[in-house]
Image: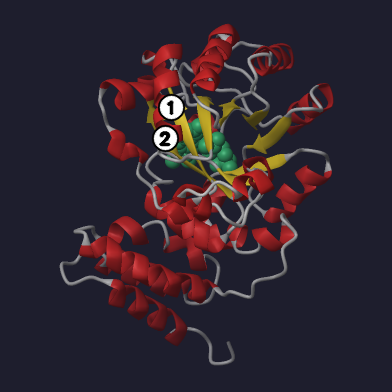
């Protein structure tokens, strides 16, 4: 935490204690993922890593500004450092949405220029904005003028028939000209016709070299590599090659502990914390109790935790017990404890 920040006496800054700046946290981030990185998921991820930057799901500026859906901004203070991702393409509306996000205490506001879904295309935002860097720059300038919170952009390397090596540097230069100093680049094109959003995360080939070249072209910018990074080894290699950050999506969700449990040590240089996966699960229990006391359902939290033991002996007992029981009316944190016990009982005796 910087000295300046330490003097901010409000409760938000107190909750942010322990990290220096958001861009330091962005050395490793968990990508925004609709329906996945909700507040329960982020709370869980934060227990696994104190340091990584966590992104919300995309929240659209029309939903916030025209729809008044302010509940979409709710999060737990423990989630800091946490970035709000916005979707939109109207500068004034995005500025207002950014202001609302800043007021809610988010550490960063990120603009989505990467999402290829139809719904998003029709609203003229997401990846299609790769075609209109001028508009993206105008949106970012308006957002910057509306708040002191850092504005960042998550983009693709191009869309459809665009030539990435031409359009990506132009895009970055134009948007950086509006004062954006940090980008996360999903290192593949989005094909807006003919591919589903899911296919658009796998089929267009990854081009890490091009993203790496951007670091050479724009050494002063903070650039994170995104797309297909499935291990901390790959993340470390990208950082060693000079990238400022690595953003991990699906692997951080499905193999949360493999990615996040050692991240503070390996990526941020902290001393090893010695916590086991079981320790993290047990730390979730008070959160689960609180959530359920407010009328929430167990499965809303545990669905994000199913992969924590992925690849470990007995993991399927953990997963199966939660999948079969989390929705039952008598489910509670005791269901989670039983799932751990079943998993442990299924492990070989020498474990
Ligand atoms: C279920 C799901 C939802 C996603 N939703 C968003 C989103 O809301 N905003 C966004 O910018 N990207 C979204 N993405 C894309 C990811 O942020 C990321 O760019 C992509 O998955 C590639 O990274 P990965 O290979 O590490 O998963 C989503 C991806 C998945 C799997």
Provide residue 263's location: percent of width, then percent of height: 66, 58
Quadrant of the rendering where the C terminus is positioned: bottom right
Provide residue 249's location: percent of width, then percent of height: 55, 44
Seen from the viewer's position, the closer of residues 76 and 213 is: 76
Say how many tags the image has.
2
Q: Is residue 249 left or right of residue 37?
A: right
Looking at the image, is 55 positioned above or below residue 271? above
The colour mode here is secondary structure
* Number of residues whose C-alpha sits closer than 10 Å to that of mark 2, classed few (under 14), some (14–19) or many (20 or more): few
Q: How far is the residue under mark 1 from the one under mark 2?
A: 6 Å
Residue occupied by mark 2 = 103
Residue occupied by mark 1 = 99
Q: Are marks 1 and 2 in contact (CB under 8 Å)?
A: yes
Q: Residue at x 55, y 48 (%)?
A: 81
Q: Is residue 343 left or right of residue 183?
A: left
Q: Place residue 211 in its image quadrant.
A: top right
Q: Residue at x 48, y 18 (%)?
A: 192
Q: Is residue 198 visible?
A: no
């Amino acid at each position: 935490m910087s000295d300046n920040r330490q003097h901010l006496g409000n409760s938000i800054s107190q909750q942010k204690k322990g990290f220096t700046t958001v861009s330091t946290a962005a050395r490793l981030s968990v990508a925004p993922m609709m329906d996945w990185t909700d507040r329960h998921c982020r709370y869980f991820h934060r227990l696994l890593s104190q340091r990584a930057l966590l992104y919300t799901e995309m929240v659209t500026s029309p939903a916030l500004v025209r729809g008044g859906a302010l509940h979409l901004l709710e999060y737990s203070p423990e989630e800091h450092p946490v970035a709000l991702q916005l979707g939109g393409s109207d500068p004034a509306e995005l500025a207002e949405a950014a202001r609302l996000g800043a007021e809610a205490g988010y550490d960063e506001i990120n603009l989505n220029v990467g999402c290829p879904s139809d719904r998003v295309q029709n609203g003229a935002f997401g990846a299609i904005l790769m075609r209109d860097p001028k508009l993206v720059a105008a949106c970012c300038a308006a957002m910057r003028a509306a708040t002191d919170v850092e504005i960042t952009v998550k983009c693709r390397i191009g869309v459809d028939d665009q030539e990435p090596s031409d359009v990506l540097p132009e895009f970055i230069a134009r948007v950086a000209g509006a004062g954006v100093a940090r980008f996360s680049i999903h290192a593949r094109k989005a094909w807006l016709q003919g591919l589903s959003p899911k296919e658009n995360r796998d089929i267009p080939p990854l081009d890490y070299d091009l993203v790496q070249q951007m670091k050479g072209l724009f050494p002063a910018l903070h650039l994170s590599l995104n797309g297909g990074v499935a291990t901390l080894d790959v993340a470390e290699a990208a950082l060693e090659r000079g990238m400022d950050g690595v953003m991990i999506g699906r692997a951080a969700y499905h193999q949360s502990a493999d990615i996040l449990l050692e991240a503070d040590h390996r990526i941020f240089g902290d001393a090893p914390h010695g916590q086991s996966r079981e320790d993290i699960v047990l730390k979730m229990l008070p959160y689960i109790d609180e959530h359920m006391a407010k009328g929430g359902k167990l499965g809303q939290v545990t669905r994000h935790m199913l992969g924590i033991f992925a690849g470990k002996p007995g993991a399927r007992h953990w997963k199966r017990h939660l999948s079969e029981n989390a929705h039952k009316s008598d489910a509670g944190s005791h269901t989670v404890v039983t799932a751990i016990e079943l998993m442990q009982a299924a492990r070989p005796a020498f474990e």
